[in-house]
């Protein structure tokens, strides 16, 4: 494991962390003894002293690696200076590296110092490793037609990207040699000790697993550019003859709204009212484009533009483009190629792009092929409720604890107020202002909310839901309507509201109300398990369809 993870190690007596397998440190593992485990182990300093004594005695008897930390540091310095190990293309698939080594059994001083500096980066490192694994999946499917049915997991960070060839040892070895020849960081794992092969009949399963698995490095410092540089790109000849057209600023608000309603899961940031509000409130210029292919409208995009000192332009696309229906990946690539032209150093412009692309290897490879650079800012994560499903199904689908809280809230004499009138909006705005001042966090600005309100029409508006207990408003939420979708935007929950589980009451009634109004999806407005874990846990309890976007990119 790389870091503490909910659900892992909670039922055992010991938890073992192996940071040297994930992080650029020379050695070290961390053993956690859980007094609250099933055996109720009592652990004190005498137990620790005893283990230290046993380990030191063992090292004195069999230790055969000296100055491991110094050697490791020298090797890394040489690598930083550009000296790389030449890959051995004659590595045997079936031969394991000798494991008859015993290094000093304690974390070195060098490793401790480096680990302290890396602790704050653990979440970012974990995300980069998962992204790299997705890129390898895409590269292998593209270049070698090898597909994996990898199951997504948020509960652990992979050490290596694993590829399984169950029952096909010959194919495993052939793929190993091919990847090695093509320059991929491929390996087998684990290196089985010699005694395993001395008694093969007792270890058939271990040997089978070792010989039917390949692994690729997903080190957090591995760049996507390096990963795809040797990719065998199969060019589709038809691509050269595709005709894609885009018209800028020729669409009316009504036409934009009609197209927006055709999008299955739209977002507020690409809506007409949001662009207009950015223009009025923050001095952005707005460009709206409609892409057509073979005379069929396929995508829309809203681009924000701002001039700096009259000589440099910043273009911003936030959660666009939006595709009206599913399109061929080649056509999608052409759309992004057209948009990438906004970033051009020779023309004095930069494009900041947060594309409406789910996080997968295909999206990450596409952005790199378009010569975009990744930003270090966190990618957007959220979940949406499918309002086309039956209400009974949606309620049963709630996490059991969440559903119980909802049931309790419904017994608390809460009454519901729903509307889009000025009274409810300004009440919500005052509570939001109070919340942002007390909690010291930044969300959408009050001025932007006011501007959106002023620019709205009857179809795209704010929907306010307020929970009242004995004539006192105890909680409220504001939902933004856009197209056939809606998004949770801001909320407030007072102390009494928290006791009465008013937020559970409001979110569930939001689903009921939006479904009755004919909307198709309800986005929960962002989930951040690092910065706001409590809010994230609350939203995840609704068991919506969770999604991760590919992240922020920029291009000059």
Image: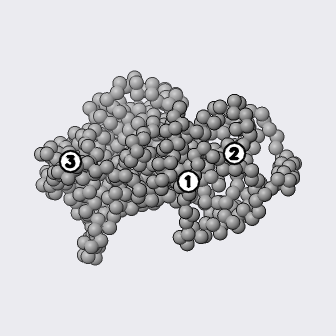
- Which residue is most to the front? 90
Q: Position of residue 18 (x, y in %)?
A: 66, 50
Binning the other alpha carbons within 10 Å of mark 1 as few (below 14), some (14 to 19) or many (20 upward) gives: few
Indicate which disc, 3 or 2, sits on the residue closer to the N terminus: 2
- CA–CA distance between discs 3 and 1? 40 Å
Residue sitting at x 22%, y 49%: 237
Indicate which disc, 3 or 1, sits on the residue closer to the N terminus: 1
Residue marked by disc 1: 90
Residue sitting at x 85%, y 56%: 60
Q: Are marks 3 and 2 in contact (CB under 8 Å)?
A: no
- Which residue is most to the top? 392
Residue sitting at x 55%, y 66%: 84
Left or right of 37: which side holds 423? Answer: left
Residue marked by disc 2: 16
Residue marked by disc 3: 238
Left or right of 160: which side holds 48? Answer: right
């Amino acid at each position: 494991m790389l870091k503490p993870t909910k659900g892992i190690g909670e039922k055992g007596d010991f938890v073992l962390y192996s940071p040297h397998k994930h992080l650029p440190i020379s050695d070290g593992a961390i053993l956690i003894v859980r007094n609250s485990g099933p055996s109720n182990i009592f652990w004190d300093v005498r137990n620790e002293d005893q283990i230290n004594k046993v380990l030191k005695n063992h090292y004195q008897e069999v230790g055969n690696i000296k100055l491991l930390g110094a050697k490791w540091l020298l090797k890394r310095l040489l690598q930083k200076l550009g000296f790389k190990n030449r890959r051995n293309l004659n590595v045997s698939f079936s031969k394991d590296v000798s494991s008859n080594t015993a290094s000093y059994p304690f974390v070195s001083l060098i490793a401790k110092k480096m680990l302290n500096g890396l602790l704050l980066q653990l979440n970012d490192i974990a995300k980069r490793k998962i992204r790299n694994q997705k890129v390898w999946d895409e590269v292998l499917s593209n270049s070698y037609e090898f597909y994996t049915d990898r199951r997504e997991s948020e509960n652990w960070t992979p050490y290596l990207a694993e590829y399984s060839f169950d029952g096909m040892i010959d194919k495993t070895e052939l793929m190993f040699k091919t990847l090695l020849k093509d320059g991929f960081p491929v390996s087998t794992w684990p290196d089985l000790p010699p005694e395993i092969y001395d008694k093969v009949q007792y270890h058939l399963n271990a040997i089978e697993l070792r010989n039917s698995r390949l692994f690729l490095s997903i080190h957090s410092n591995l760049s996507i550019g390096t990963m795809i540089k040797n990719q065998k790109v199969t060019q589709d000849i038809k691509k050269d003859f595709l005709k894609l057209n885009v018209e800028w600023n020729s669409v009316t608000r009504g036409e934009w709204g009609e197209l927006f309603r055709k999008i299955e899961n739209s977002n507020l940031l690409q809506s007409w009212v949001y662009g207009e509000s950015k223009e009025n409130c923050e001095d952005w210029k707005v460009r709206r484009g409609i892409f057509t292919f073979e005379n069929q409208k396929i995508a829309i995009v809203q681009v924000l533009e701002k001039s700096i000192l009259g000589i440099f332009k910043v273009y911003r696309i936030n959660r666009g483009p939006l595709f009206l229906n599913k399109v061929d990946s080649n056509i999608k690539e052409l759309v992004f190629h057209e948009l990438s032209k906004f970033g051009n150093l020779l023309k004095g412009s930069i494009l900041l792009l947060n594309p409406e692309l789910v996080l997968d290897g295909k999206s990450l490879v596409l952005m790199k092929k378009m010569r975009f650079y990744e930003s270090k800012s966190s990618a957007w994560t959220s979940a949406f409720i499918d309002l086309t499903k039956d209400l009974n199904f949606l309620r049963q689908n709630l996490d059991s604890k969440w559903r119980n809280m909802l049931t309790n809230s419904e017994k608390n004499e809460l009454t519901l107020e729903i509307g889009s009138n000025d009274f409810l909006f300004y009440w919500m705005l005052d509570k939001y202002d109070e919340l942002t001042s007390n909690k010291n966090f930044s969300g959408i600005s009050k001025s932007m909310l006011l501007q959106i309100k002023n620019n709205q029409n009857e179809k795209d508006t704010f929907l306010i839901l307020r929970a009242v207990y004995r004539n006192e408003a105890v909680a409220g939420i504001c939902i933004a309507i856009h197209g056939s979708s809606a998004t949770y935007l801001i909320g407030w929950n007072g102390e009494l509201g928290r006791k009465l589980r008013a937020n559970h009451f409001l979110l569930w009634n939001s689903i009921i109300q939006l479904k009755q109004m004919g909307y198709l999806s309800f986005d929960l407005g962002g989930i951040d398990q690092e910065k706001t874990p409590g809010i994230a846990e609350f939203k995840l309890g609704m068991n919506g369809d969770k999604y991760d976007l590919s992240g922020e990119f920029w291009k000059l």
